């Protein structure tokens, strides 16, 4: 992979990493808004006219598109994203001491979100989409790009325990529940903590509001246009489908949910990592 050989990290690079459909777009918006809050007034912020994926690029996409030089042209500190599992990250990144923020999400919701996303992409190419049950089964088998989901999260979890000052591990569900606490945590990790004055002025709430699902979904920049390269182009609007948690209940049977939860629980056992929404074992399990 070209990226493994040719990517040149800078010491102040920040990497936003996730399994696809785990809250990537939201994390990009929040990290970018938090980091640039003193550069732009939040009511005239670039996120009002650009999609979060425009302001925080996927570095692997740029390599695949032969546009790696765009990464070199970005001013420091760069915020870059990837879905790569930890073991595939270039050694130049893992050995560099660069900061990483990882976000995870209940795998059941991830599968639903990914299924809708894939269905749209298939429809756009005139192809048929996998039936949901089959797609769900593939997730249980770990038969997806970047999979298995649990291994992806577990590797970054372990790294966050080993190097907590460099790797911050976030959970989508906790961010929805306590956005203010998580924005403050993000700001501290980014080295730009919110001052008392900013807190009094309501900057935290402004960041949350600017990056909220409803706000971003309503913007022209996210209703129109697309992301990706050549045949892999996807509409910006498809990154703002439903938002929130628990949509798996509208797609998967309780038995399917129990199966995936069971696999995830077993794989995470003893690691200390728990994922909100992954149910505790019941007596029948
Ligand atoms: P990606 O990995 O392809 O970039 P990602 O952004 O992780 O996708 O999408 C995951 C979910 O985040 C989507 O869920 P859904 O399909 O169940 O609707 C998406 O709606 C949701 N999402 C996007 N933006 C936000 C936001 N600002 N706040 C909360 N959730 C969001």
Image (cartoon, helix red, strand yellow):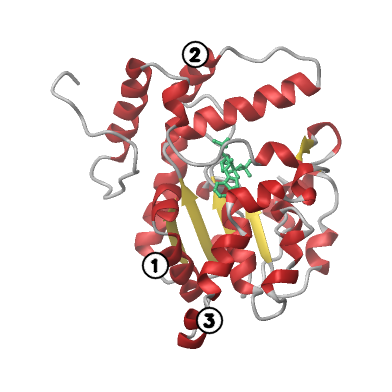
Q: Of the residues under marks 3 and 2, which one precedes in the sequence?
A: 2
Query: For numbered disc 3, what is the local secondary structure?
Result: helix
Query: For numbered disc 2, what is the local secondary structure?
Result: helix
Q: Which circle, 3 or 1, is nearer the viewer?
A: 3
Q: Which mark is residue 164?
A: 1
Q: Which residue is drawn at 61% across and 58% down?
A: 211
- Judge left or right: residue 73 versus residue 196: right
- Ligand 1 neighbours mark 1 (CB distance < 8 Å): no
Q: Residue at x 71, y 52 (%)?
A: 53
Disc 3 to disc 1: CB gap under 8 Å? no
The residue that label 2 is drawn on is 133
| Mark 1 and mark 2: Cα distance apart in space | 38 Å
Asked whether 80 or 50 is in front, the reply is 50
Expressed as whole percent of the image width and height from the top left, the position of residue 240 reads 64, 41
Asked whether 26 or 64 is in front, the reply is 26
Q: Which mark is residue 75?
A: none
The residue that label 3 is drawn on is 201
- Height in image: 132 above or below 238? above
| Mark 3 and mark 2: Cα distance apart in space | 49 Å
Label 3, residues with CA under 10 Å away: few <14, some 14-19, many ≥20: few
Q: Which residue is drawn at 57% across and 12% down?
A: 131
Asked whether 132 or 86 is in front, the reply is 132
- Height in image: 284 above or below 97? above
Disc 1 to disc 2: CB gap under 8 Å? no
Label 1, residues with CA under 10 Å away: few <14, some 14-19, many ≥20: some
Residue 242 image-quadrant placement: top right
Q: Of the residues under marks 1 and 2, which one precedes in the sequence?
A: 2
Q: Residue at x 79, y 58 (%)?
A: 49
Residue 93 image-quadrant placement: bottom right
- Height in image: 95 above or below 194? above
């Amino acid at each position: 992979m070209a990226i493994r050989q040719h990517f040149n990290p800078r010491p102040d690079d920040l990497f936003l990493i996730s399994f696809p459909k785990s809250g990537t777009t939201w994390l990009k918006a929040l990290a970018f808004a938090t980091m640039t809050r003193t550069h732009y007034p939040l009511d005239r912020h670039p996120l009002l006219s650009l999609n979060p994926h425009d302001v925080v690029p996927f570095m692997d996409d740029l390599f695949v598109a032969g546009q790696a030089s765009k990464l070199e042209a970005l001013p420091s500190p760069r915020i870059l994203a990837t879905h790569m599992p930890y073991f595939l990250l270039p050694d130049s990144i893992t050995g560099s001491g660069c900061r990483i923020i990882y976000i995870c999400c209940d795998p059941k919701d991830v599968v639903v979100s990914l299924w809708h996303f894939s269905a749209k992409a298939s429809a756009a190419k005139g192809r048929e989409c996998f039936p949901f049950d089959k797609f769900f089964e593939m997730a249980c088998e770990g038969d997806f790009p970047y999979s298995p989901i649990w291994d992806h999260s577990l590797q970054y979890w372990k790294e966050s325990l080993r190097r907590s000052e460099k790797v911050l591990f976030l959970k989508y569900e906790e961010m929805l529940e306590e956005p203010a606490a998580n924005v403050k945590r993000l700001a501290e990790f980014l080295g730009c903590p919110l001052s008392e004055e900013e807190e009094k002025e309501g900057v935290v709430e402004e960041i949350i509001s600017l990056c909220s699902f409803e706000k971003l979904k309503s913007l022209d920049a996210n209703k129109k246009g697309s992301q990706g390269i050549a045949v892999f182009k996807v509409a910006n609007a498809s990154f703002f489908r439903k938002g929130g948690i628990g949509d798996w209940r509208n797609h998967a049977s309780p038995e399917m949910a129990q199966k995936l939860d069971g696999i995830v629980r077993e794989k995470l056992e003893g690691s200390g990592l728990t994922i909100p929404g992954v149910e505790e074992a019941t007596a029948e399990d």
